Image (cartoon, rainbow, N blue to C red):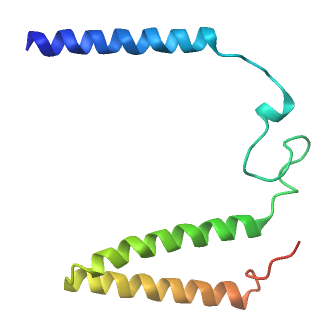
């Protein structure tokens, strides 16, 4: 028990020491490009709400749904009845969701 306490104290001390060394040695440049958003595709000056494209959000949601579908597909490989039923329900939601997106014209990409 004493060894675990000593190792924990040394680990926390080493963590704090390395963090402080990293903070002191790192270069700090505050520029416009460093503080702006990275993956959004537009500058963060002015009104952001007007320039946000809903198509970017829809593509992100479709990516998340496909990731979920792959996880559910792994569950089907177990060949349990409950995993098969849950996979079929998920596929039904995906097909109905894509049909609704197609029906409302949200899958057409405008540039």
Tell me if 56 is positioned left or right of 94 in this view: right
Q: Residue at x 86, y 45 (%)?
A: 43
How far from the left and from the top, in percent, is residue 101?
67, 84
Q: In which quadrant of the rendered view does residue 80 lie?
A: bottom left
Which quadrant, please, contains the N terminus?
top left
How far from the left and from the top, in percent, is residue 9?
26, 10
* Frontmost residue, 111 versus 103: 111
Q: In which quadrant of the rendered view does residue 86 lie?
A: bottom left
Which quadrant, please, contains the C terminus?
bottom right
* Frontmost residue, 2 versus 88: 2
Q: Residue at x 10, y 9 (%)?
A: 2
Tell me if 42 is positioned left or right of 54 in this view: right
Q: Is residue 33 above or below residue 24?
A: below
How far from the left and from the top, in percent, is residue 49?
83, 53
Q: Is residue 50 above or below residue 6?
A: below
Q: Residue at x 30, y 86 (%)?
A: 85
Q: In which quadrant of the rendered view does residue 73 lie?
A: bottom left
Q: Is residue 40 above or below residue 58?
A: above
Tell me if 60 is positioned left or right of 109 in this view: left
Q: Residue at x 21, y 84 (%)?
A: 79
How far from the left and from the top, in percent, is residue 4?
15, 16
Report the number of discs.
0
Tell me if 39 is positioned left or right of 48 in this view: left
Residue extending farthest to the right is: 46
């Amino acid at each position: 028990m004493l060894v675990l306490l000593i190792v924990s104290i040394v680990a926390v001390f080493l963590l704090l020491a390395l963090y402080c060394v990293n903070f002191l040695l790192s270069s700090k440049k505050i520029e416009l490009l460093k503080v702006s958003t990275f993956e959004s595709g537009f500058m963060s000056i002015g009104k952001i709400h007007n320039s946000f494209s809903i198509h970017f959000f829809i593509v992100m949601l479709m990516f998340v749904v496909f990731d979920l579908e792959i996880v559910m597909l792994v569950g089907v490989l177990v060949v349990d009845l409950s995993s098969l039923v849950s996979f079929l329900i998920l596929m039904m939601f995906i097909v109905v969701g894509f049909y609704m997106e197609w029906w409302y014209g949200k899958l057409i990409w405008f540039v």
